Image (cartoon, rainbow, N blue to C red):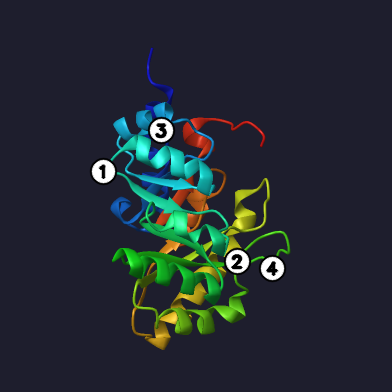
Amino acid sequence: MADPIAANIDHIRERIARAARRAGRKEESIRLMAVSKTVEPARVRQAVEAGIRIFGENYVQEAREKIPALGPGIEWHMIGHLQTNKVKYVVPLFDWIHSVDRIELAGELDRRAGKLGRTLNILIEVNVGGEASKSGAPPQDVPALIRDAALLPHLRIRGLMTMPPYSENPEDARPYFVSLVKLRDAIRALAIDNVSMDELSMGMTDDFEVAIEEGATIIRVGRAIFGQRPAR
């Protein structure tokens, strides 16, 4: 029997290639992250065997058990909301943090990374939709947050992340992706030291093609790879 996870990944890569062509982009400029929350290590290993090397986790406790079980050669991204008191567990495990939305969190990440002699790649999470139910810094606060975080020596600010308001129509996400690109461009124009703004983490299972058309460099896909998750 064919491996359904490998087949799903092949199909997603085809969709990525088509979306990239529509946008006049190179397929290689888009990185596919497999969101592996609630997925047991054996099934994550199937995705590794199918060529995935970037995985995103949402929950600290789950990641603490899973990441050591998968071994080396995988790039792990923390994409869930992160409480400051969990940073001590996160810094040794993850290469990237996508959910930095306040200077207190950035400061604790820097402090813990410094203790371990590490430099963390971070993305600033932006609440483009202004939803009270979602994490992320308001767009108008992001430049000041980045100026402050850029002074922290053990963090590298690589770009922005967002999650637009849910809609069954992928096209409804487009204005939010456009807004994130405009914010990225405005921050680039500030030419802040230690800030590269080369990554846009946006787009998930239902809207990643629209995100690619608008400039996503990292797409976060879970359900289309691993299937429907059980309710938590």
User: Residue type at mark 4?
Assistant: Gly
**Residue ID for mark 4:** 130
Image location (x, y in percent) of residue 6: 37, 28
**Residue ID for mark 3:** 44
Give the alpha-carbon distance from disc 3 to disc 4, as whole Å. 33 Å
Image location (x, y in percent) of residue 120: 36, 65
Badge 2 crowding class, 10 Å Cα cut-off, few under 14, some 14 to 19, many 20 or more, is many
Image location (x, y in percent) of residue 212: 44, 55
**Residue ID for mark 1:** 73
Q: Secondary structure at mark 4?
A: loop
Q: Secondary structure at mark 1?
A: loop
Rendered image quadrant of residue 185:
bottom left
Give the alpha-carbon distance from disc 3 to disc 2, as whole Å. 28 Å
Q: Residue at image x 69%, y 68%? A: 130
Badge 3 crowding class, 10 Å Cα cut-off, few under 14, some 14 to 19, many 20 or more, is many
User: Residue type at mark 3?
Assistant: Val
- Whether residue 212 can be seen here: no
Image location (x, y in percent) of residue 47: 37, 33
Whether residue 109 sits left or right of residue 104 in the image: it is left
What label sits on residue 136 in the rendered view?
A: 2
Q: Quadrant of the C terminus?
A: top right
Give the alpha-carbon distance from disc 4 to disc 2, as whole Å. 9 Å
User: Residue type at mark 2?
Assistant: Gly
Sequence order check, earlier mark of 4 and 1: 1
